[in-house]
Image (cartoon, rainbow, N blue to C red):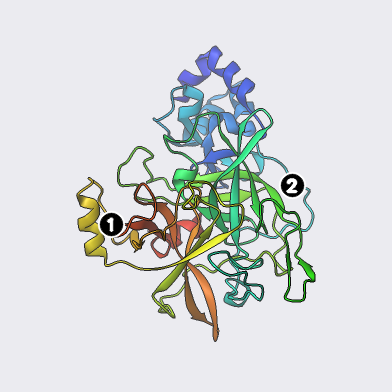
Amino acid sequence: MFAAVVRNIYLLLSLCATAKAASFLAYGTCINPHQVKGICVQIRECNYLINVLTSNLTEESRTFLTNSQCGRDTSKHFAEEKILVCCPEEFSNRRRTNGTGQTPGNLLPEPGKCGKAWSNKIIGGNKTGINEFPWMALIQYKTGPDEFGFHCGGSLINARYVLTAAHCLKHPSLPPRWELYAVRLGEWDLVQDPDCIFDSHGLKDCVEPYMDILIDYGIAHPGYIPESNDQFNDIALIRLVDSVPTTSGYIIPICLPLTNKPRTSNVMQVAGWGATESGLSSKVKLKITINEWNIKQCQNLYREYGKAINSHYQLCAGGEKGVDACSGDSGGPLMAMQRLNGRNRYVAIGIVSYGPTPCGLKGYPGVYTRVDSYMDWIIDNLLP
């Protein structure tokens, strides 16, 4: 395979020309022939192997290149996109951090430091409190030259990673020119910066400004098939260029289901800035409260539309008229309360995957990816 690539001069030129320091799609973690942990990426994203490929090749280096393969992405059209290699993490074509004060990305927060269930500034209705669900993330895409937009959600799980849906990284509905760009944290009202409300005495009360952090790369679950009708394995991780300061209180991670402890309640919540009943995205973070559906009923319902529901990897919730996660909420967390270390904490039970069109149809629940079934995959793909 690599011998053919080496002989292809056009491909070599393409590799050098297309290498760029921007966010990209990774294919998981891996171990290279030298037993160094890396990330599985398109070969054009790895300066280290491009340099080997374009140097005077020896038999040893040819063998190293061949054994560095970690797969193929057959959905791509060009050879430089199909070839996947295990690139040592420090040598990938990544945006570089400033190297100061970085919190390791492979550590998950202790239960007492995630999922805090407080909000002392509730506004009312379906609006969240100004500091409620402080792990909520907006995923920003570069949609054209100097053009950007938010089109998915996610949840911060530690200082360097955001949990989201795989269809937010690769899906037929995503225009090919769109690139993952940044994650916004600490946001409430998209129109204000900083976010402010007025208390009962008419005094203005503000929180800290939001943070936009560049995306390093995204990893979709290897079992996710974008064109699949069933959307199994709809889960992904986004690694941030810089670690997030999570000690201020206005940005903290959500807890993950690391234990088998029962939920405090079967009532769950979803939050986001997705489409509302008006058909337009909300400018303010909203929330809904929903109940889990009987999985057998959900399976029977979606079977009529040619969609299979796997109870081990998916769950259903909602189904009330006008109450649903919707377009733009994709990738956001389905949250439930658990008793951890003697306190109630929010845990990411699910990830918004798909639902009926239009949203909020009575008797049609939304479908969510079960997070607890993917904990091994999540932990295996967290790098320092």
Circle 2: is it few (<14), some (14-19), or many (20+) Cα within 10 Å? few
Question: What type is the residue that disc 2 sits on?
Answer: Thr
Quickly name the residue at label 2: 97
Q: Secondary structure at mark 1?
A: loop
Mark 1 or mark 2, which is nearer the start of the sequence?
A: 2
Q: Quadrant of the C terminus?
A: bottom right
* Figure check: 187 above or below 58: below
Q: Position of residue 207 (x, y in %)?
A: 75, 64
Q: Quadrant of the N terminus?
A: top left
| 37 with respect to 259 (left or right) | right
Quickly name the residue at label 1: 310
Q: Quadrant of residue 377?
A: bottom left
Circle 1: is it few (<14), some (14-19), or many (20+) Cα within 10 Å? some
Q: Which residue sits at x=72%, y=62%?
A: 245
User: Observer-nearest residue: 287 or 24?
Assistant: 287
Q: Position of residue 116 (x, y in %)?
A: 60, 74
| 200 with respect to 307 (left or right) | right
Question: What type is the residue that disc 1 sits on?
Answer: Asn
